[in-house]
Image: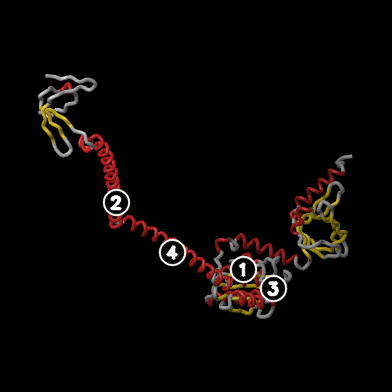
């Protein structure tokens, strides 16, 4: 037999056919979920069915980040993925990349397509974002005139700044004509000359928020000369308007927080800053005054007048010390002289004469200290206390013996 193929060859061939078919590689399939099983590996195995057919499907764990709800039996969903053959079992199945609940699926596809197209045009680029004024006093609001969004914005604005002026354009934010109404509101408020414009509404489904995903609204925001803050839905909701706007807020209340500065907080900050400046200035003045006082003391000390006074005082002190030293030296000298005088007085011949002694000299005034120095008939002069006597030697007697010289 010719052209006989193995099962593996046939399954591999069929797999190649599925792989080469572009329509099957990226397809949306709508159906009811059944036999849904969450595997321990993180994969989800399920079946999609309608009234007459079923198709096996799997979503691998790596694609589950795009699944915003828990997949359960009985749900009608739209699954995006590719159909391919599982060669081992010879079965084809859907390999799902995204799964949407029915009703949101088509809108979500349109949302993704518009988001991609506008992003490629550069409408989301940061270089086109206008800065939000830090101290806005006139804030425009494009939203429904009734509902929680406008009340939340008013309450936040009153709490943060009682002096801010709010300008409301009561736009239709849901249903037919909502996009055109929002565009008209943006264009109208842009001509008023406001500081900031808030566009937004409360949360809801993708259908409820669809007006903020329309291209005409995106272009109106992009062309607006006034900075625009988008506060649409809840924190998890993201619309095309959020991407185009100059700033995105998770809720209308948060948008008002960003648009309206906190007057009381600013007042407190200014008060604190004023006190801090006063304290710093006072401390600096105190330090400067202290430095000036120290400089004044130094200048006074170094001034010529003070230097002269100091030198005069120093000279006077030296003069006093010198006088004291001279006086002390005179006293010491007088004491020394008195002692010497007493010593001299003790050695003075007059003192001895006062005691009855006499001083004998020859005619020339030479002292006669020994009988050997004189002869008989020599004249001698005898000094007494009250005068002198001239006498002639008649006899000389040596102590210890008596003799006469002639």
38 w.r.t. 145: above or below: above
Do residues under tags 1 and 3 come within 8 Å of each other at their CB atoms?
Answer: no
Q: Quadrant of the C terminus?
A: top left
Element at badge 2? helix
Marks 1 and 3 sit apart, C-alpha to C-alpha, by 18 Å
- For residue 320, the mark is 2
Would residue 30 appear left or right of 257 to someone viewing this image? right
Residue tagged by mark 1? 218
Which of discs 2 and 1 lies nearer the camera? The answer is 2
Foreground tag (4 vs 1): 4
Image mark for residue 161: none
Q: Which residue is mark 4?
A: 285
User: Which mark is first along the chain, 3 or 1?
Assistant: 3
In the image, which is nearer the foreground, mark 4 or mark 3? 4
Residue visible at 71% across and 71% down in the picture: 203
Instruction: For marks 2 and 1, give the CA distance.
Output: 103 Å
**Would you say residue 227 is visible in this rendering?**
yes
Q: Nearer the viewer, residue 107 or 258?
A: 258
Mark 3 secondary-structure assignment? loop
Label located before the other in sequence (3 or 2) = 3
Residue 255 spot, x, y in % from top left: 63, 70
Q: Dot 2, crowdedness within 10 Å: few (<14), some or many (≥20)? A: few
The circle drawn on residue 202 is 3
Q: Quadrant of the N terminus?
A: top right
Residue 388, image x, y percentages:
13, 35
**Percent coordinates x, y for residue 65 in the rendering:** 74, 57
């Amino acid at each position: 037999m010719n052209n006989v193929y193995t099962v593996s060859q046939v399954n591999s061939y069929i797999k190649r056919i599925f792989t080469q078919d572009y329509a099957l590689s990226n397809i949306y399939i709508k159906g009811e979920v059944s036999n849904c099983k969450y595997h321990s590996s993180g994969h989800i195995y399920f079946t999609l069915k309608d009234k007459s057919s079923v198709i096996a499907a799997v979503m691998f764990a790596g694609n589950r980040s795009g699944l915003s709800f828990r997949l359960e039996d009985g749900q009608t969903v739209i699954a995006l993925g590719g159909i391919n053959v599982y060669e081992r079992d010879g079965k084809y199945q859907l390999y799902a990349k995204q799964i949407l609940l029915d009703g949101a699926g088509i809108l979500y596809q349109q949302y993704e397509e518009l988001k991609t197209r506008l992003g490629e045009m550069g409408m989301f680029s940061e270089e086109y974002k206008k800065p939000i004024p830090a101290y806005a006093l006139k804030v425009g609001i494009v939203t429904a005139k009734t509902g929680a969004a406008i009340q939340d914005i008013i309450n936040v604005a009153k709490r943060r700044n009682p002096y801010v002026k709010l300008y409301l354009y009561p736009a239709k934010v849901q249903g037919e004509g909502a996009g055109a109404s929002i565009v008209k509101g943006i264009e109208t408020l842009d001509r008023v000359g406001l500081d900031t414009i808030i566009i937004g509404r409360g949360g809801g489904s993708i259908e409820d928020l669809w007006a903020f995903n329309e291209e005409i609204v995106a272009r109106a925001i992009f062309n607006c000369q006034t900075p625009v803050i988008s506060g649409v839905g809840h924190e998890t909701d993201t619309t095309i308007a959020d991407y185009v706007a100059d700033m995105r807020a998770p809720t209308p209340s948060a948008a008002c927080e960003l648009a309206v500065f906190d007057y009381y907080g600013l007042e407190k900050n200014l008060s604190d800053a004023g006190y801090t400046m006063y304290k710093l200035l006072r401390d600096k003045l105190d330090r400067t005054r202290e430095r000036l006082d120290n400089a004044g003391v130094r200048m006074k000390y170094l001034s010529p007048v003070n230097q002269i006074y100091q030198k005069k005082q120093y000279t006077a002190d030296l003069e006093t010390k010198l006088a004291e030293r001279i006086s002390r030296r005179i006293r010491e000298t007088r004491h020394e002289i008195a002692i010497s005088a007493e010593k001299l007085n003790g050695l003075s011949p007059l003192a001895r004469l006062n005691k009855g002694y006499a001083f004998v000299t020859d005619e020339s005034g030479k002292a006669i200290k020994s009988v050997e120095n004189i002869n008989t008939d020599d004249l001698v002069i005898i000094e007494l206390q009250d005068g002198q006597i001239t006498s002639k030697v008649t006899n000389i007697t040596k102590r210890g013996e008596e003799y006469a010289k002639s």
